[in-house]
Image (cartoon, grey):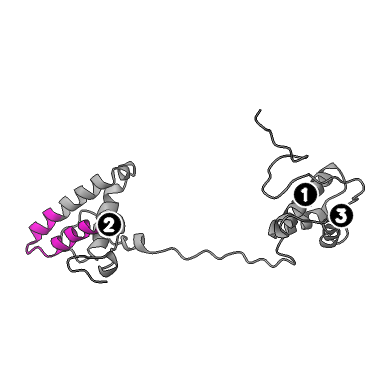
Amino acid sequence: MNIEGLDYNTQRERLILPEYGREMQKMVDHAMGLPTKAERQRAAESIVDIMERMTPQSRENPDYKQKLWDHLALMSNFKLDIDWPFDISEAQKISTKPEPLAYPMARIPVRHYGKMIFELFEKLKTMEAGPERDELVRMTANQMKQNLLQWSHGSADDEKVADDLARYTDGKIQLDLDNFKFDNRTPGNSAGAGGKKNKRK
């Protein structure tokens, strides 16, 4: 729908630095079109003064003046013919997007336990029997059950946890279900063992 006199952002030229707004970009464009270098210089200094007032927090940085002139250079596409008070040769780096980080795609046998649980399996394989290993077994088994509860929408089998724990530790860890007690938790419940929450009276 076209209504005469209305102007939509989607129909306008894309802003180089949107944080300064379209009016500031118009001021830069105007400065670029001034006929003399002296006029362009005065206009550029006025624009930088306005940019500084728009971003007072930038004054906390020791090189904030440099950054403001860099921004002006970017907004003018480096075509503003003035005597730049700073070296603007590095300004382009501001608008350069960093390369995306590679996402770790570790292969694990089953997704519902997650990479960290399989790291715990590897650690348990090499630990000597004792209180430290027992505590890690307890934590691992409870987290495995929690993951299963979330994955299967609220149901989990203790025997499956024990079987998986033995399988993925190459038989090193054998969970005795007759003596082992899982924490009584449900997905999203951060209460401790017993699953009780404090209730207001």
Quarter holding the C terminus is: top right
For mark 2, what is the residue?
71
* Residue 160 % position (x, y): 83, 59
Whether the residues at callouts 3 and 2 have beta carbons within 8 Å, the answer is: no
Q: Residue at x 66, y 48 (%)?
A: 188
Q: Main secondary structure of the magenta part?
A: helix
Question: Magenta segment range?
Answer: 20-43
Q: Residue at x 86, y 60 (%)?
A: 163
For mark 3, what is the residue?
173
Between residues 135 and 23, which one lies in front from this camera angle?
23
| Magenta residue check for 191 | no
* Residue 136 % position (x, y): 79, 47
Quarter holding the N terminus is: bottom left
For mark 1, what is the residue?
142
Can you name the residue that lies furthest to the right here? 178
Residue 87 in view here:
no
Q: How many marks?
A: 3
